[in-house]
Image (cartoon, grey):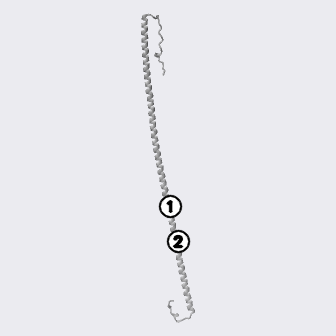
């Protein structure tokens, strides 16, 4: 860093009023020269000290800025990691909830299918029972009808036989036994 410092510039030589060589003047000039050198050295030391202080402050400021930046980055990274964990937890919970809902849906579907199967079995059983009942009723009805028909046939056969016997008896000669009001069964 180059900063113009007026005390660093070489001092112009002092114009001499008297010609050199006078002993009094030489000692005065050399005193002035020594003072000037001391002032220059002091100014240079002050400048070096000021520059050193400036560099130290600049270094401290740079370190502070770097530490702030590092702390900000650490906080950001920590925040990102926390957000990442939260997101993973949220996704995990969402996945668990999705699986639970899928299991509930599957269980509901299984229950519905089981219920439908039971209803279908019961309906088929009722239909079969109704058919059997209907066919049992039909069988009973047909058996009763057949029995009634058989009884009618037997009765008509008995009536026919009786009428044939009666005709046979009429066509035969009347005998004494015919007067009997209670004939013996044959």
Question: Where's residue 49, x and y in %?
Answer: 42, 20
Give the labeled residue for mark 1: 117
Which residue sits at x=44%, y=29%?
63
| Vertical relation: 113 (above or below) 55 | below
Question: Where's residue 40, x and y in %?
Answer: 44, 15
Which residue sits at x=43%, y=13%?
37
Q: In this image, 149 relative to 56: left or right?
A: right
| Vertical relation: 51 (above or below) 89 | above
Q: Mark 1 or mark 2, which is nearer to you?
A: 1
| Mark 1 to mark 2 CA distance (whole Å) | 26 Å
Q: Given contact means CB atoms under 8 Å apart, are the residues at marks 1 and 2 in contact?
A: no
Which residue sits at x=42%, y=11%?
34
Give the labeled residue for mark 2: 135
| Vertical relation: 85 (above or below) 125 | above
Tell which residue pokes out farthest to the bottom in this image: 176
Chain-order first, disc 1 or disc 2: 1
Q: Which mark is residue 162?
A: none
Question: Where's residue 155, x and y in %?
Answer: 54, 83
């Amino acid at each position: 860093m180059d900063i113009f410092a007026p005390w660093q510039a070489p001092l112009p030589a002092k114009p001499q009023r008297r010609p050199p060589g006078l002993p009094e003047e030489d000692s005065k000039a050399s005193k002035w020269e020594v003072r000037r050198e001391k002032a220059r050295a002091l100014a240079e030391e002050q400048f070096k000290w000021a520059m050193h202080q400036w560099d130290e402050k600049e270094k401290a400021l740079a370190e502070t800025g770097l530490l702030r930046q590092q702390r900000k980055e650490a906080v950001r990274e920590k925040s990102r990691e926390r957000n990442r964990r939260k997101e993973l937890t949220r996704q995990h919970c969402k996945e668990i909830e999705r699986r639970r809902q899928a299991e509930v849906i599957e269980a509901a579907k299984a229950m519905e299918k089981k219920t439908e199967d039971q209803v279908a079995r019961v309906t088929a059983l009722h239909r079969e029972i109704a058919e059997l009942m209907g066919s049992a009723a039909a069988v009973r009805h047909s058996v009763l009808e057949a029995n009634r028909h058989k009884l009618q046939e037997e009765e008509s056969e008995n009536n026919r036989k009786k009428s044939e016997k009666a005709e046979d008896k009429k066509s035969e000669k009347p005998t004494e036994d015919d007067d009997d009001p209670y004939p013996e069964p044959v």
